[in-house]
Amino acid sequence: MTSSTVPIDISAELESHRSDVYLMVGNSNNADIFYATHFSASDRFAYFQTKNGNETLLISDMERGRAELESRVSDIRTLQDLGYRSKVNERKDPTLAYCDCIAEVLQKEGARRVAVPRDFPYYIAQTLKEEGFSIEAIKSPFLQLRSKKAPSEAEVVKKVQNACNTAMEAAVEMIRKSEDVEGILNYRGFVLTSEMIRKEIDLTLLEHGCESDSTIVAGGTGSANPHWEGQGPLKANEPVVIDIFPRSKKERYFADMTRTVIKGDPSEKLADMYEAVLEAQIAGIEMVKPGVKCSDIHNKVCDVFKEKGYDTTREGSTVGFIHSTGHGVGLEIHELPFVGNSDVELEEGNIITIEPGLYYPDVGGIRLEDLILVTSDGHENLTEMEKRFVY
């Protein structure tokens, strides 16, 4: 995590927009606010950074003590400090009173030109405009900063990926121990379903201080839909795509991993697909190092598939390899850099997935995903889980 003694400097971005201050309003669901402050709350709060680098946190009265302990921002002001209750009585509207408190902070900083993120609350922006402030919605200045993880951040992601590895092992073990009963997998006398495996994954992650929404356990031909979560009984001799992307409940960083397994005997087509995906993934991972363009990695993966006779997204196909090769992972599950048709070069500290897949509606899907840290001279694979198809 970023030390409280080290400023997160976005002054160059503010200068380029001729802005006096950058303002965010949100809650614990806002990754940029958490990155900038190391503070989270269920109720909305505000973060300010001036062009001179001064940072301010505006929070509710109840959060002062916790903010003083947790936030990396030292200038903490509460709504009570700014007379919020009297403003509510005067305005007869809590939201207008909140806007007045923000305006007061801006006025004390001498800020008139205010830069805000593109998802900034519309009503607050309009009210601030009416109070004489100039508002410009800009691309987040924190996205690029967040894409390069400090060593402390990388350690958190490694910890979450270790939990993900344990959860994946538990999921695959259920499939390995299952029995084929008239084509349906049975586990300990019960029909094995996607829901049962998801429950085991969730429980395992909770034991390691993590949580995960929308975990994918997709079996059969339905696995050809990359984001289908899967439901119902799992069958023998059919692929099961398991995609787990947990988040640390405390540090709030994500990890990501996908494995595809089968209980029984795969068809020749499925076996060939798996080998092609594995070869494409290995080729993509081997390229990861600073200075390599994301598009070059993506094109290499596409080249491997084309050489093996499979369709790819590069040619506009709607079957075969139909998505990008990977994405950054951090405080959001999908963040910069995106490993696809982008000429952005990898940098030390990027954490990305390499996750090629093949999808054919009449056969099913195969996907393998590892989490890779870009190091000073190459990469480190943070994913320990074996790549074994048949159980």
Image (cartoon, rainbow, N blue to C red):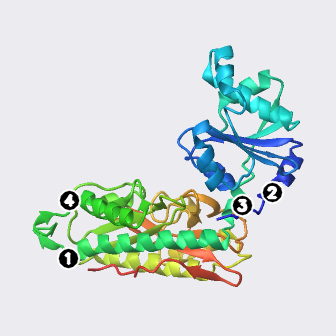
Mark toward the viewer: 2 or 1? 2
Could you tell me how far apart the alpha carbons at marks 4 and 2 are, in whole angstroms?
Answer: 52 Å
Q: Secondary structure at mark 4?
A: loop
Q: Is 26 drawn above or below residue 86 in the view shown?
A: below
Could you tell me how far apart the alpha carbons at marks 3 and 1 are, in whole angstroms?
Answer: 49 Å
Of marks 4 and 1, which one's residue comes earlier in the chain?
Answer: 1
Q: Secondary structure at mark 1?
A: loop
Mark toward the viewer: 4 or 1? 1
Horizontal and vertical percent for residue 241?
Answer: 36, 66
Question: Left or right: 270 with respect to 78?
Answer: left
Of marks 3 and 1, which one's residue comes earlier in the chain?
Answer: 3
Label at residue 4 = 3
Location of mark 2 (residue): 9
Could you tell me how far apart the alpha carbons at marks 2 and 1 are, in whole angstroms?
Answer: 53 Å
Of marks 4 and 3, which one's residue comes earlier in the chain?
Answer: 3
Mark toward the viewer: 4 or 3? 3
Question: Left or right: 275 with respect to 153?
Answer: left
Question: Left or right: 362 with respect to 244?
Answer: left
> Label 1 amino acid?
Lys
The N terminus lies in quadrant: bottom right
Query: Is mark 4 in CB contact (under 8 Å) with mark 3?
Result: no
Q: Is 107 drawn above or below residue 63 in the view shown?
A: above
Q: Is 81 drawn above or below residue 192 in the view shown?
A: above
Depth order, front residue of 177/103? 103
Location of mark 4 (residue): 233
Label at residue 177 = 1
Horizontal and vertical percent for residue 293?
Answer: 70, 71
Of marks 2 and 1, which one's residue comes earlier in the chain?
Answer: 2
Label at residue 12 = none
Query: Is mark 2 in CB contact (under 8 Å) with mark 3?
Result: no
